[in-house]
Image (spheres, helix red, strand yellow):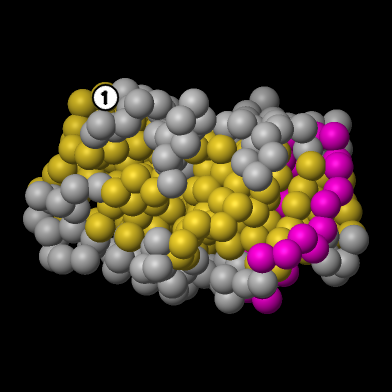
């Protein structure tokens, strides 16, 4: 990969994303959305901060949640469009499902599901605050990480439905769904993952981490799961019907004295990238075991990272607000 772009924005980089056209989008902590390819910049949350961001279900533009209680869709052609507002709330997690054209976001114990096709909103209420959200691949069900497990709702039916629950004691802070829809994995407060095989709810504990897991990403056609929380990127296999049950994880490119802060894998290939707490970024091809340093010098912690759909571009940003793009 060769250097293609670097620009300081002087604000924490909340999210680095590629849209359906493989164009990079960056969400900044001071409320701005940046489209580096076109040099366009929008103040999506004026006088407020962005807390969460995902690509819109249409694949164009980005949806952001802020500490102003607003949910905003920003595209490079139309600019910011407000989708919802909840005064006094913080919108710190959003999920989107291209298959069903639905968006979900949480305000403490409430999860709101916005159906873009029917133009209606449902609200599901939980016993505890919700920490993260993910739809299944068909957008039929919404999985909500919360205290003592995962609450599962049918995303498009009545709000009075009784949800099911995947139970495991403790606080679940992040969630990811295997692209096959067969497994859901959470990161826990106590430096471990927990997972469930959904066809029979058989669960598994995936521990051994020295630090909290802030980032997890399925890649390589869903056959591998990468996570942060160790000196290297930790990779779990999902090659068989049992998933990682009975399998060992691999740690890729461990660095003494440094911790991986964020990971991103190529959707279709065994290519993995990781950013570290000391500001470095590397790229690994797992079949050849080749590791390439994208940014070898230390600096501000890497806070956001993405690999393009074609796996030919890497986009990342750091705590001080510098955004980088490298290209093959």
Give me the residue at 32% from left, 31% from top.
209
Magenta stretch, overall SS: strand
Q: Quadrant of residue 310?
A: bottom right
- Please state if 212 lies on the left or on the right of 74 as rendered: left
Give the magenta range. Answer: 1-28
Residue 103 appears in which quarter of the rendering?
Answer: bottom right
Q: Quadrant of the C terminus?
A: bottom right
- Which element carries disc 1, helix, strand or loop? strand
Q: Bin the neighbour count of mark 1 within 10 Å (Cα to Cα): few under 14, some 14-19, many 20 and up.
A: few
Q: Which residue is drawn at 15% across and 66% down?
A: 240
Q: Position of residue 27 (x, y in %)?
A: 73, 47
Q: Is residue 92 magenta?
A: no
- Residue beneath label 1, please? 170
Residue 5 within the segment the image draws in magenta: yes
In front: 313, or 139? 313
Q: Position of residue 16 (x, y in %)?
A: 66, 52
Q: In which quarter of the image is residue 116?
A: bottom right
Count of marks, rendered view: 1
Q: Residue at x 34, y 45 (%)?
A: 251
Query: Depth check: 130 or 3 in front?
Result: 3
């Amino acid at each position: 990969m060769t250097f293609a772009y670097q620009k300081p924005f002087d604000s924490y980089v909340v999210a680095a994303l590629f849209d359906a056209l493989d164009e990079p989008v960056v969400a900044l902590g001071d409320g701005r959305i940046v489209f580096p390819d076109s040099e366009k910049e929008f103040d999506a949350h004026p006088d407020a901060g962005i807390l969460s961001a995902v690509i819109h279900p249409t694949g164009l533009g980005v949806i952001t949640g802020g500490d102003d209680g607003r949910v905003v869709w920003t595209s490079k052609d139309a600019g910011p469009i407000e989708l919802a507002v909840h005064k006094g709330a913080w919108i710190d997690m959003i999920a989107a499902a291209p298959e069903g054209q639905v968006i979900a976001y949480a305000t403490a114990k409430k999860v709101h599901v916005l159906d873009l096709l029917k133009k209606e909103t449902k609200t599901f209420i939980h016993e505890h605050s919700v920490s993260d959200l993910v739809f299944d691949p068909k957008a039929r069900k919404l999985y909500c990480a919360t205290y003592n497990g995962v609450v599962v709702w049918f995303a498009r039916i009545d709000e009075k439905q009784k949800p099911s629950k995947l139970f495991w004691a403790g606080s679940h802070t992040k969630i990811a769904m295997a692209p096959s829809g067969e497994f859901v994995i959470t990161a826990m407060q106590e430096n471990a993952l927990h997972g469930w095989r959904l066809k029979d709810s058989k669960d598994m504990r995936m521990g051994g981490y020295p630090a909290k897991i802030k980032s997890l990403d399925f890649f390589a056609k869903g056959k591998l799961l990468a996570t942060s929380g160790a000196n290297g990127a930790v990779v779990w296999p999902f090659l068989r019907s049992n998933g990682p049950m009975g399998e060992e994880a691999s740690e890729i490119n461990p660095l003494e004295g440094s911790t991986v802060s964020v990971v991103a894998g190529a959707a279709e290939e065994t290519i993995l990238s990781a950013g570290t707490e000391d500001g470095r970024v590397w790229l690994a091809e797992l079949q050849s075991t080749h590791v390439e340093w994208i940014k070898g010098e230390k600096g501000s912690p890497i806070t956001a990272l993405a690999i393009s759909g074609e796996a030919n571009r890497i986009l990342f940003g750091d705590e001080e607000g510098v955004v980088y793009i490298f290209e093959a």
